[in-house]
Amino acid sequence: MARSPNVPIIPGLFLALSPLALAQQTLSPPQPVLPQTVAAEIQLLEDHLLRLGAWPLQTEPQQIAATSLGGPFQLWKEQAPSLINLRRTMVERHMDGYPLTDEVVRVNWLSDGTVLVHGAVSRARTWSGSNQIGGTYAGALAKQIFTAEWPVEIHASRLEILPLADGARLCHRVDLTSSASTSIAYRVWVDAEHGHLWQVKNRSIHSTGQASVFMPNPVETLDNPNLTDQNDSGTAIPAAAYFPVTLEDLDGSGYMTGTWATTAPTPNRSFRANLDFTHNRQGRIFEETLSYYHVTTMQHYLQGLGLTARQSVQPINVVDLLFGFPYANASYNPNTGVISFGTRGVDFAEDADVVIHEYGHAIHDDVQGGIGNGENGAMSEGYGDWVAAVHSNDALVGEWVGTTLGGGSGFPAVRRVDGMKHYPEDIVGLVHDDGEIWSSTLWEIGLMIGPDAVTQLVIEAMSTMTSGTSMSRAGELLVIAESLLTSGSNLPYVAGPLARTGLINLPPGTPMLEASRRGLRAGDVLTFRLSSATHAGSNFQTVLSQIASPSVSGPPFNTTFDIGTEMFGWSLSIQALSGQLDANGKSVFQLTIPPGLTWKDHYFAQAMILDGSQQAIALSPPIAFRAERH
């Protein structure tokens, strides 16, 4: 057996490689010189809002960035306009003719007459070093993170200035890929003068989910967590889990290549001259069909909403191998744009949740102009989970793949988007865990305003962000996008979820209604927490509804809710929903969920603070729930 490649074990979106996946191989990590941190040199800049009259559309964006932030910039990317953007550009900071690492600033002309300028730049004003080793030798040094036996190619290379804790250095930035696996994406910074490896970054973005002409997967469709893979058996899944679909936009070549997706990276991909790819799950053709269909369907949905900022043709590899072996994961490669799916256990391209999760990374990469690390990387995982949940209209993500991964109790979903994590105390530094903060926020907003409106909002807000955007800043940009899309009419339905997860602060004195869960199941105890420090000792009344729309209560409360009043009388009859705030302006009360809830029905709640004559003097932002099976 040939010696195993000396590369790092790449963690998956949902789990690291299992012992089973490593049974036939031993992977040892590379030994590059440990990178110095650049965190000490990076400072986030405040946003600059400039009047459009001073900066007309034809103004060079690099001039605006230089005037606003100082230092020369060069145009890096001109992106398509969108619903809230008259023009979208990204510029890159340069010093003495060299670009600085990841110092990209966004300049957007917004539809309300402002220019938004923001990004992350370092305090570096000087640099050292010279190009003594040359690009060819720098590439050879970068490739040494792999052993000589392992095939690796240089995807791209350039000279740039890397800010470091002890001063900025001129480096060769080398992007590496491998012909042996489309999931490999590394970026290496090599000192241009001495050949020192300053940094090694794994850029591959990994995750898990589900896919095929399952809609989205057989576990959800049949509500059966006991289904098993049975080594890709065509008879393991009942016929009721399959849905006939039309593959649109094919180019007629006989392969699954079309306007929005192609399986061209798949080795020995399927060919049908008559374009009839009908097959059960036993075989590659089913996974190609599922991934092509769901990516194309999602893109049609985005186009129908007027969202034109997107990846054009999405390359897909449904049988990727990691170091020559099947692996239990899926990934998006930002170097090549390829989505890759592993085949250990349940094939990952058999779960549409997985396919759309990965496509969410591709959309994020394209619309934002690159995916960052830390909170921005966690947001990418959250985007992926959220868009998969929107696509399947289900809060559980990856039930079919979850039967292989295990590791949890109850229904075998990999993750769900209706969790209760709070920013920043629940940030743990793991992108998949931290991403649940972002996905749950977007999910609740969607429960309020519907899938179409929230998708427009999220993609348009994404178009104003950069790879350095944090969750809290992203929350503020969601509010800006909402104000441009609806002139603020949806603000209560956007601000409430953002405030409940800690991503924005509401004006002082705003009552806050919180709950112990978002997913409702009969018999569960739902605990409410109401707080309003400026109304200590006041009475309150909580109202329930199945409508998220402004409505007038009439007497005695004389207020305009952000939810309906069709359950008003029932709400008043439930003693637990009313009470008095204590001396700290707080109250905790509970409600047992009654039977008879219909799966996926939405419910909303809003609290009123009352004066002595029962007049409403303040309202909490509404809160959203949904009936769930599991």
Image (cartoon, grey):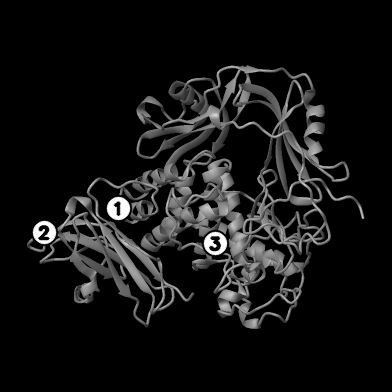
Amino acid type at image mark 3: Ala
Name the residue nearer the viewer: 5 or 384: 5
Residue 349 pos. (x, y %):
68, 64
Mark 1 highlights which residue? 489
Q: What element carries label 1?
A: loop
> What's under tag 2, amino acid-wise?
Asp
Quarter of the rendering containing residue 280: bottom right
Of residue 349 and residue 249, the one placed in the foreground of this image is 349
Determine whether 208 is above or below 572 in the image: above
Residue pictured at 77% horizontal, 51% vertical:
181
Task: Report the Cα–Cα distance between label 2 and label 3.
Answer: 45 Å
Q: Residues within 10 Å of mark 2 (few under 14, many from 20)?
A: some
Name the residue tied to disc 2. Answer: 611
| Residue 319 in the image, given as x and y percentages of width and height | 76, 61
Q: Are marks 2 and 3 in contact (CB under 8 Å)?
A: no
* Pointer 3 or 1: first along the chain: 3
Task: Report the Cα–Cα distance between label 2 and label 1.
Answer: 27 Å
**Mark 1 Cα-neighbour bin, 10 Å: few <14, some 14–19, many ≥20:** few
Residue 519 visible somewhere in the drawing: yes
Residue 322 numbered mark, or none = none
Q: In this view, does 64 lie above or below 543?
A: above
The amino acid on which the numbered mark 1 sits, given as a three-letter code, is Ser
Distance (Cα) linking label 3 and label 1:
27 Å
Q: Nearer the viewer, residue 109 or 325?
A: 325
Sequence-earlier tag: 2 or 3? 3
Q: How crowded is mark 3: few (under 14 residues within 10 Å), some or many (20 or more)?
A: many
* Quarter of the figure with residue 223: bottom right
Say which residue label 3 marks. Answer: 388
Image location (x, y in percent) of residue 473? 43, 42
